Amino acid sequence: MNIALLLEMAAEAAPDRVGLVCDGKRWTYGDLLAAARGAFELVEQSGAQYVALLDESSEAAVIALFGASLAGVPYCPLNYRLADADLSALLARIAPALVIGDEERVMRIAGDQGHTVLSREEFALKAQELVPEADDRVYDPGEGVAVQLFTSGTTAAPKAAILRHSNLLGYILGTVEFAAADEADAALVVVPPYHIAGISALMSSIYAGRRIVMLPSFEPEAWLRLVDEERVSNAFVVPTMLTRIIAAMDNGTPAHVASLRAIAYGGGKMPREIIERALQLFPDSGFTNAYGLTETSSTVALLGPDDHRAALASDDPKVRARLGSLGQALPTVEIEIRDEDGKVLPPGEAGEIYVRGEQVSGEYKEKSALTADGWFPTRDAGYIDEDGYIFLSGRADDVIVRGGENISPGEIEDVLLTHPAIADACACAVPSIEWGEAIGLALVTREGEAEPDHDELKALIRGRLRSSRLPDKIVFVSELPYNEMGKLLRREVKKILAD
Amino acid sequence: MKPGTRLKSAADDTEVMVIRCADGTIECGGAPMGEAKPETPAPLAADFSAGTLMGKRYVDAAGQYELLCVKPGKGSLSVDGVALVTKDAKPLPASD
């Protein structure tokens, strides 16, 4: 079964209902399906093995996702915030592709890789023009890979996480009632198209018949304006966005948010102060913390609206603490905690979070990360309490999650070590209200050298990496802590930076 | 018969996608379903004319069969003469 079925059914049931609003343009489900079929023709003509999107959200993301699935090639949206060298390497891994979006940049950094490159507008236009007259096309049955997302981590090369039609359909059919949305409902999609939540939001909204209202680039004032103008009923944000929305509201930006029945968040740590303030500013909204990963087709656990309100109102510390939890596993998946040897741990004991279910892929192009019995190790450290509430206790693999973005300490440390006065460097997560986690550096100066100036170090990082890699805190130490095996004790460095 | 097959009713407009199946005969309106519609429609059995709803999933008691209705009709679904029942999605409190 192909994920395109979701759009086909929506178009069959309500061809003239508006399914997507973006930059003032309205697309019906009928329009979207026709364009997806036109995009299928484009893919066939180009001989592309992938459909890539290098762009902010727009109707092109929907047309590309379903056009790719009809053609049986993976849809692979790319992170436009990556540096040229990194992006070029990823483009090389998916060549030849039909690449939609930043034409100029793709031609400049990957012009010799054999891609077919179209701007967003050209793609949408051609897709609409190429609608076949007779419906005798043979579309892909959907037995393979629907989506490929490159994830970042501590290793040098990003991994290609793959999600099969069966994983995505398992998630959508299991959690969305077809056409259950009210015609007035609208979902504001603002997470980037290369984030798994941005992709599953499209699918669940289309299958539910809930109009998607896209905000290509997040700005708190624009978000609030769109909520009002389109009477948005559902929204998903990453914690940093909610922080900025609250700041805008507290600063007097007009906000008419009564239509917002449901606000979901995920992708990073939600600071307690922010969710508590949000619960006050949006008294009529149900809040949901959604925990999931790219490899699990997004949400596998959640803390629902009732739990949020109960935690805020409760005197019982155990109930209050739940506001900081990931909630409970979805009924369609299983979650357990295992120790380093793979043994399942009882409630209260911390280990690694494992998950199993139809929606869980855990597959990468190169290999599968699933255990023999089909469980996926998330690399998140945590524990489950006796009531089934899951709590994170840090990340098992040192990745810093800043504003929903995974940052590898290694790449920052490597850059710092190129400075002649730096002998040793360690980058760690430090708590941040704005970002959830921010970057802290512990540095050791080379003997005989003077401590480099913070601005100089920041300029070095900015020149080689990008602005999201800049540290919020820098401390100099006489030496970094290592164990007898020569392993850097990052947990100890975190304590030093926390002081 | 395998998952991913699209079946059409011989007796009414119902069409389903097979999500899961075993070796029995999948029927709608009392008549076996197939990948193509027959030249002459089969009669709609009174016992199996409760109707199907688009987007609903239909399952048997043992959990061996799961069908997604992609086109509704007047007939109702069964396997080897035993009626299937609907399986509800478990909606999340908020969309992604």
Image: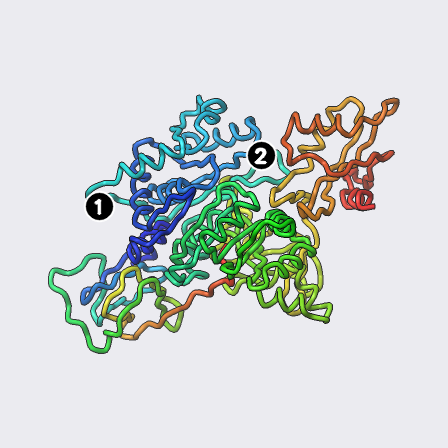
Q: Residue at x 61, y 51 (%)?
A: A249
Q: SS for tag 2?
A: loop
Q: Is residue A341 visible?
A: no
Choose the circle earlier in sequence order: 1 or 2. Answer: 1
Residue A72 visible in the current orientation: yes
Are the residues flagged by discs 1 and 2 from a single subunit? yes
Residue A422 x %, y %: 79, 27
Residue drawn at point x = 73 percent, y = 24 percent: A418
Residue drawn 27% across the image and 66% down it = B26
User: What is the number of the mark on residue A157?
Assistant: 2
Residue shown at 65% from the left, 43% from the top: A402
Amino acid type at image mark 2: Ala
Chain identity of mark 2: A
Image spot of residue A29 (x, y percent): 33, 51
Residue ranking furthest to the left: B40
B52 or B17: which is nearer to us? B52
* Amino acid, disc 1: Asp
For the rendered model, the colour scheme is: rainbow
- The quadrant in which residue A46 appears is top left
Graded by Cα atoms within 10 Å as few (under 14), some (14 to 19) or many (20 or more), the crowding at tag 2 reads: few
What residue did someone put label 1 on? A135
